[in-house]
Image (cartoon, grey):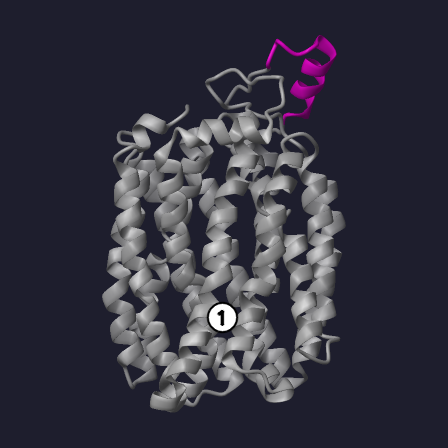
Amino acid sequence: MMRATVDFSLPMTEAASAQAAQPVSTHRYLALGLLFLVYAFNFIDRQILGILVPAIKADLNFTDTELGWLGGPAFAIFYTALGVPIAWLADRSSRTWIMTIALVAWSGFTAACGCVANFTQLFLARLGVGVGEAGGVAPAYSLISDYFPPNKRARALAVFSFGIPIGSAAGILIGGLIASRLDWRIAFIVVGLAGIALAPFFRLLVREPTRGRYDFAPMTASKASMLDVARVLAAKPSYWLLSFGAASSSIMGYGLFFWMPSFLIRSFDFGLEQVSFFYGSLLLFGGVAGVWLGGALADTMGKTKRSRYALIPAAAFVLTLPCYVLGMLSSSPVLAFLLFLPPTALGLMWLGPVITAMQHLAPAHMRTTASALFLFINNLIGLGLGSLLIGAVSDALAAQFGEQSLRYSILAGTGFYVVAALLMLAASRTLARDWTD
């Protein structure tokens, strides 16, 4: 059994309290399961808009560019701006309380999306979703790092990251089925209320673990300022290369999450329900396999060489390119499914390795803030630009390609995977030097 360490520099009463608060080994898996479930709701509420785009466009007469604003900047503006200060607060207070409040906030605004009448109202509701979700991820990374020792951390973070493909698949499936049989507004309201119902269970069952309990370096009792964190990270080039590499891949990742349902409807004449099962299955099977494979490879191969935490994503990004190009040019839905499945997995393989590396590029008392800075870069660029760029290019190409403009807009965007691979390769050269045990 793993033995937790206590920082004896703390006052005796605080040390005893910290020891008592440490989770038993069985509780860590319950906590991980609930953290995954909250993260799944994070992506259900974030990505459900993508499957509802055709119905919203038909009802409210939005252009692809307007829809791109709703899928990207509307969500990303406050999501990225508030993520760092909320994480700074989480390094000083209860991470579980912050996540509970965040879950209620973003779920409430998701439900509000079902009550809008125009672009401005939907834009503001999506801003609210972003405000809530700003507190839902960085604290979870820090909690998992204190629940699991380093040799199990990449797989634990990979399990947590299952929330991305499973949540996205659930959002597409649930949203598509409800919208096709009832109404797109009801889809928003149903998933929003479900998230609010989860919040009290999460708060009651997930305990706050002792910070830095598995770290070799002694946990400091002082609280780092934002400037302190910035100074530590400024000297670590691998942190920035990993951050911008992940962000480059996320331009395509988030762009595809948002626009793939519309592409399938326009290019293959799918109905909304058919799209739900087609793309939901791609995300579920391909996404889960990719996230788990990335985490397992990182835990296995990273033991002897830290650079592999960056080389694994670099190789995966290179392999995504030919599969997506062939899939986008295919005229057969069956062939397209088979071609899209591998890159759906490969495009998410970076999560376990990169997020784990991030936990080792800053000391434990700076970990949540460092994770939030990473998320700020990743989401400001990837989430903020992905759907907007693809939508704007699609509108620009519409005069030449008509309904097929979205196909060629997505094809142009696959070049971001090349940029991501090059940045990951560069990060592999400095990662071992920057690593903090």
| Overall secondary structure of the magenta section | helix
Residue 350 visible in rendering: no
Q: Does 17 lie within the magenta span?
A: yes
Q: Is residue 392 left or right of residue 333?
A: right
Q: What residue is rendered at 38% in x and 31% in y?
A: 236
Secondary structure of the residue carrying numbered label 1? helix
**Depth check, front residue: 332 or 403:** 403
Q: Give the magenta part as a residue range.
A: 7-22
Q: What residue is rendered at 63% in x and 47% in y?
A: 82
Residue 188's x, y, as percent?
Answer: 68, 71
Res 264 quadrant in image: bottom left
Residue 65 visible in rendering: yes
Residue 14's x, y, as percent?
Answer: 71, 15
* Residue carrying label 1: 258
Up-down relation of residue 161 to residue 333 (above or below): above
Which amino acid does the dot numbered 1 rest on? Phe
Up-down relation of residue 76 to residue 36 (above or below): below
**Depth check, front residue: 85 or 319:** 85
Res 183 quadrant in image: bottom right
Residue 79's x, y, as percent?
Answer: 60, 53
The mark tally for this picture is: 1
Res 286 quadrant in image: bottom left
Residue 157's x, y, as percent?
Answer: 47, 43
Q: Does 79 lie within the magenta span?
A: no
Up-down relation of residue 250 to residue 150 (above or below): below
Q: What residue is rendered at 52% in x and 72% in y?
A: 68
Quadrant where the C terminus lies? top left
Mark 1, Cα crowd under 10 Å, few <14 / some 14-19 / many 20+, is: many
